[in-house]
Amino acid sequence: MVKHQYYYHDLSDDLVTTKDQDYHLASNYTILPTSTGHRFWSAIIKRVAHLASIIYNRVIVRVHIIGKEKLAAAHGQGYFIYGNHTQAFGDAILPLSFLPANNYYAICAQANWSIPILGKLVVPYFGLPVGYNLQESGKLVKAVKKIIKASKTVVIYPEAHVWPYYTKIRPFNATSMHFPIALNAPSFVMTTTYHRPKRGKQPQIIVYLDGPFYPDNNLNKKQAQNKLHKQIYTMMQKRAALSDYQYCTYTKKD
């Protein structure tokens, strides 16, 4: 049974927005602050977030994850995970089902910092804000380099906008592969799929992890980005095709 109906003009439309969708952080914001107070609260917030992930993913929505063992191929390295963006809240804590909280960061829009409570207490300890200008973009680049060098993980949702329970993969640009190519780091694919539930209306969620995919150092930057993009997009499409339950419908407007 269909729970929600969404209408769109283009596959890049932003269908789920916050109250302050155009929110901008103060120009002097810091990514990965190192103060004693930040480290103290970071430890607490990350433990709480990990517990919340267990409750939400295992008890409330009952997520089943296939392929966690594949991440061992990149043990001791920093790496990237690319996922389809189909859960407004769930995607934020899904990676905590298989990643240590201290190792997990996600690139996200600055609007997430405007979310009541979560935007002040949780997002700053996991989120890497997309920049609105060259200076802010530079901050992001430095933060990502630091995280990968420390053998931690950066999650990227290249579709950018959330489409709840969407069962296909929306197009995204090859420039989304900039960081793995620039830092010569491996990437994995995390594809969320939706299946007919044994009981009730809420779909069974199965998440597939695939990879690693490595940059081809025999190609120039643009060629390497295109190759990695094709590998990741193709794998996402392959897994998304396993979905067999439509919880929401999407209709294109003329």
Image (spheres, rainbow, N blue to C red):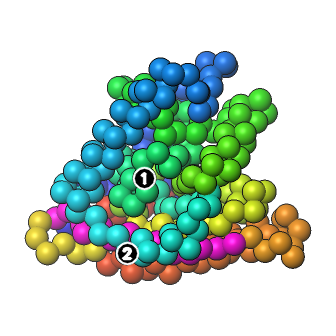
Instruction: Name the residue rendered at 27%, 46% in the picture.
Output: 51
Q: Quadrant of the N terminus?
A: bottom left
Side of 56 relative to 226 (left or right): left
For the record, the magenta segment spans 201-214
Mark 1 nearby-residue class (10 Å; few <14, some 14–19, many ≥20): some
Q: Is residue 38 above or below residue 63?
A: above
Reading the chain from its start, which is encountered first: label 2 or label 1?
Answer: 2
Residue located beneath label 1 in the image: 100
Residue 235 coordinates in the image, percent (x, y): 55, 77
State the image quarter where residue 12 is shown: bottom right
Is 50 magenta? The answer is: no
Side of 181 relative to 59 (left or right): right
Main SS class of the magenta portion in the image:
strand
- 120, 109: nearer the viewer: 120
Residue 3 coordinates in the image, percent (x, y): 23, 58
Q: Is residue 207 above or below residue 8?
A: below
- 80, 239: nearer the viewer: 80
State the image quarter where residue 130 is shown: top right
* Count of marks, rendered view: 2
Residue 223 coordinates in the image, percent (x, y): 83, 71
